[in-house]
């Protein structure tokens, strides 16, 4: 039975608004990733750069990177709209230098490693000078922390060992178009698909 009590209607409207906001986030967040990729195209673990982790941070935090999270954010959309967005997100994921199992595994250890290192740097800064802002982790310090993190995934029915440092190094080669990614279209396909996602979601919200 549909309730016409003002409080109940307000709650339903707020729930619907939050679901639509989730879909809008898929578009707005996508633009932030494109900006980060454009701002630090040559970043790598061996060349200290204040923003080298930003694009990877955003990719791993992006709801569209994990299919189940993306589905949650698309619940309020009509089926044809959801299908189009699924197709665009599939193109985006396929162009990333990680498979589904690696993407799912990467999130927690990556952000754990970064936060632990930043926490250690912060504590060291406070101990040395409470008023002095601690220095950002250097590429070498971050590399050492990342390389120490290992795990296992199952992909295609096969158990596979994964190393966080190796995966982040792969991201760096991919973003620069080095080694096995030389001449590839992965970065441009990610940029193009994210821009299409942003345009599509924003157009749907304005309709």
Image (cartoon, rainbow, N blue to C red):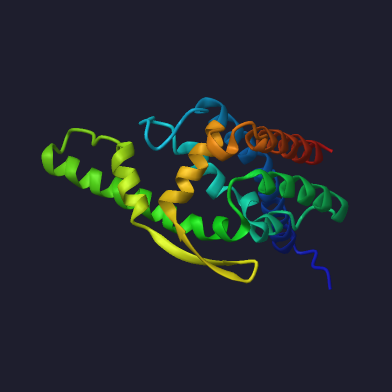
The location of residue 172, given as percent across then percent down, is 49, 38
The location of residue 84, given as percent across then percent down, is 82, 47
Residue at the spot x=37%, y=35% of the render? 46
Residue at the farthest bottom position: 1
Say if residue 193 shows up in the picture. Answer: yes
Q: Quadrant of the N terminus?
A: bottom right
Q: Is residue 38 left or right of residue 2?
A: left
For residue 102, which quarter of the picture? bottom right
Say if residue 21 shows up in the picture. Answer: no
Comparing 68 with 103, the one in front is 103
Q: Is residue 40 left or right of residue 190?
A: left
**Numbered-mark total:** 0
Q: Is residue 43 left or right of residue 124?
A: right
Query: Where 177 falls versus 98 (above or below)?
Result: above
Residue at the spot x=30%, y=37% of the render? 138
Residue at the farthest front position: 179
For residue 155, which quarter of the picture? bottom right
Q: Quadrant of the C terminus?
A: top right
Query: Where 123 falls versus 158 (above or below)?
Result: above
Residue at the farthest left position: 128
Comparing 111 with 200, the one in front is 111
Query: Where 61 falls versus 30 (above or below)?
Result: below
The location of residue 198, given as percent across then percent down, is 71, 37
Residue at the spot x=73%, y=40% of the render? 197
Residue at the spot x=28%, y=49% of the render? 119
For residue 121, which quarter of the picture? top left
The location of residue 27, given as percent across then percent down, is 68, 40
Residue at the farthest right position: 80
């Amino acid at each position: 039975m549909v309730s016409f009590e003002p409080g109940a209607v307000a709650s339903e409207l707020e729930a619907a608004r939050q679901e639509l906001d989730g879909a809008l986030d898929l578009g707005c967040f996508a633009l932030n990733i494109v900006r980060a990729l454009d701002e630090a195209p040559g970043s790598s673990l061996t060349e200290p750069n204040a923003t080298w982790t930003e694009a990877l941070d955003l990719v791993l935090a992006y709801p569209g990177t994990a299919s189940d999270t993306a589905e949650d954010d698309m619940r309020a959309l009509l089926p044809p709209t959801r299908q189009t967005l699924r197709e665009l997100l599939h193109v985006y994921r396929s162009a990333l230098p990680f498979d589904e199992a690696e993407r799912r595994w990467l999130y927690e250890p990556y952000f754990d490693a970064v936060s632990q290192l930043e926490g250690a740097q912060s504590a060291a800064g406070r101990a040395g000078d409470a008023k002095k802002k601690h220095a950002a982790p250097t590429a070498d310090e971050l590399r050492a922390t990342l390389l120490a993190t290992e795990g296992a995934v199952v992909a295609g029915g096969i158990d596979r060992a994964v190393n966080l440092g190796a995966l982040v190094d792969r991201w760096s080669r991919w973003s620069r178009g080095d080694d096995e990614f030389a001449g590839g279209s992965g970065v441009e396909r990610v940029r193009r698909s994210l821009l299409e996602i942003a345009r599509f979601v924003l157009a749907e919200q304005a309709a």
